[in-house]
Amino acid sequence: MDFGLTEEQRLIKDQIRDFAVNEIGPLVEEAEETEVTPLELFPKMGRLGYLGITYPAEYGGAEADKISECILIEELNKVCAGIAGALSTTHSGLGTRALNEFGTEDQKQRFLAPAIKGEKIGAFALTEADAGSDAISMRTRAIRDGDDYILNGTKMFISNGTFCDFVPVACYTTDPKKVEKRGKGISFLIAEKGMPGFTTNKLDKSGNRSQETAELIFENVRIPKENLLGKEGDGLAQILATLIPGRLAYGARATGLGQAAYDIVYKYAQDRVQFGKPIGKFQANMFKLVDIAMNVDIMRLMTYRTAWLYDQPGLKFAKEAYMVKIFTTETIQQIMLKALAVHGGYGYMKEYPIERMWRDAKMLNITEGTTEMAYLAAARELKI
Ligand SMILES: Cc1cc2nc3c(=O)[nH]c(=O)nc-3n(C[C@H](O)[C@H](O)[C@H](O)COP(=O)(O)OP(=O)(O)OC[C@H]3O[C@@H](n4cnc5c(N)ncnc54)[C@H](O)[C@@H]3O)c2cc1C
């Protein structure tokens, strides 16, 4: 068993770390304050080949392995979880994964290739106000009219929703009352910015403020049949194909945030003096630091092992992927509480980065399926 990174993975790690620190770092404060995502980062990342790291070379991707993608996500999250979410998890993950797997050649040329270059930005619209964990109870409907579909409905909490150029939208293309099984009859239609009847409302949220989130409203939006993703009625398979590999991204997100928290707390515990000595010399704080370091190590190992499994032809990874989502996104909550505790009152102040990271971490055990839903899915995989 080889636990070392390959030469290529090490190179990616160094390059991404430099990019994140030098290009993203200076933009974080303003983006978090104003809740405006710095869109200029998309073409910059695209030019360097970081937006399609695992995608096929024919569309501009780098065809790297899944561990490399985890490394990329981890390094971005060490600097800013919100911006990292906009660039990697949403754009290069949710927004394009199903296009790569199910899209027609025309769709790949129109959406995937420009997304990999950072010329078009993607999002993914599944959740509705009354259909979250129970996403397939969605009300969004599309009815065929000649060569078009007419789309009606409202999607909630859509990351990158305000500025995306395209967004696969989950909807029923068959009357849900007439399908033989729950979840049948769902399709994805790719809506594009500027289509008449497609509007957005920006939402105000607690963490990850540098990644914009929106409600998307579709009122009689005419979508050409060429924008149907894959086959009509294949939506459920596309949802699973998008969300299950996405669990790995959550492992990498939590690991990045956890590592950054450790680095910050380690330094703070050396610098802050109480009772005449650095607070890191008090065993209560030492133990918290050890706990954080140990859990970051476990999170990283679990994530990379599952990423390795993902890349092995014929091996299953779904059970491990759900467990990565549960363990890492719950563990990061405990890590952040410990990191805040070592900071005392300063951890609660906005000028200290740990305060933002604590708010950012909370999103991870909610989005792309809450912990409870991941437990149910893992239990199904384990046949419990
Ligand atoms: C910042 C942010 C960004 C997001 N980005 C996107 C996006 O880009 N695209 C998108 O489509 N969606 C997105 N979402 C939506 C996200 O995936 C949902 O919020 C999530 O799936 C939970 O749905 P809900 O909020 O409706 O909670 P609910 O489904 O109402 O759940 C409420 C609580 O009940 C629990 N619960 C529900 N059902 C069960 C059950 N059967 N057994 C046990 N417990 C249960 C849940 O675990 C949770 O604790 C985003 C959400 C946020 C907050």
Image: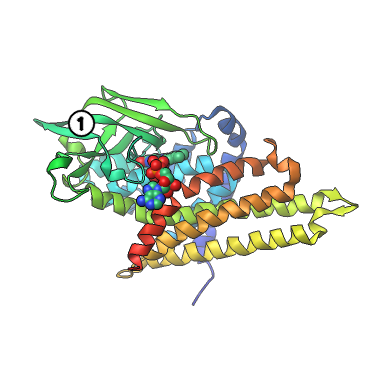
On the image, the x and y values in percent for residue 329 come to 51, 54
Farthest residue toward the top?
Answer: 196
On the image, the x and y values in percent for residue 83 come to 51, 40
On the image, the x and y values in percent for residue 283 come to 78, 62
Q: Is residue 321 left or right of residue 6?
A: left
Looking at the rendered structure, the secondary structure element under dot 1 is strand
How many marks the image carries: the answer is 1
Q: Is residue 383 left or right of residue 364?
A: left
Q: Nearer the viewer, residue 40 or 383?
A: 383
Quadrant for residue 190, please give it: top left
Q: Nearer the viewer, residue 235 or 84?
A: 235
Farthest residue toward the bottom?
Answer: 1
Q: Is residue 117 visible?
A: no
Q: How is the image coloured?
A: rainbow
Q: Is residue 105 left or right of residue 273?
A: left
Q: Nearer the viewer, residue 205 or 26?
A: 205
Quarter of the rendered structure image containing ligand 1: top left
In the displayed structure, 116 sits above or below 225; it is: below
Farthest residue toward the left?
Answer: 146
Tell me the kind of residue under disc 1: Ile
Residue that appears at 53% across and 71% down? 3
In the displayed structure, 314 sits above or below 299; it is: below
Q: Quadrant of the C terminus?
A: bottom left
On the image, the x and y values in percent for residue 294 come to 63, 64
Residue bearing the label numbered 1: 223
Residue that appears at 53% across and 62% down? 300
Q: Is mark 1 within 8 Å of ligand 1?
A: no
Other-residue count near label 1 (Cα within 10 Å), few / some / many at <14 / 14–19 / ≥20: many
Residue that appears at 55% across and 47% down? 361
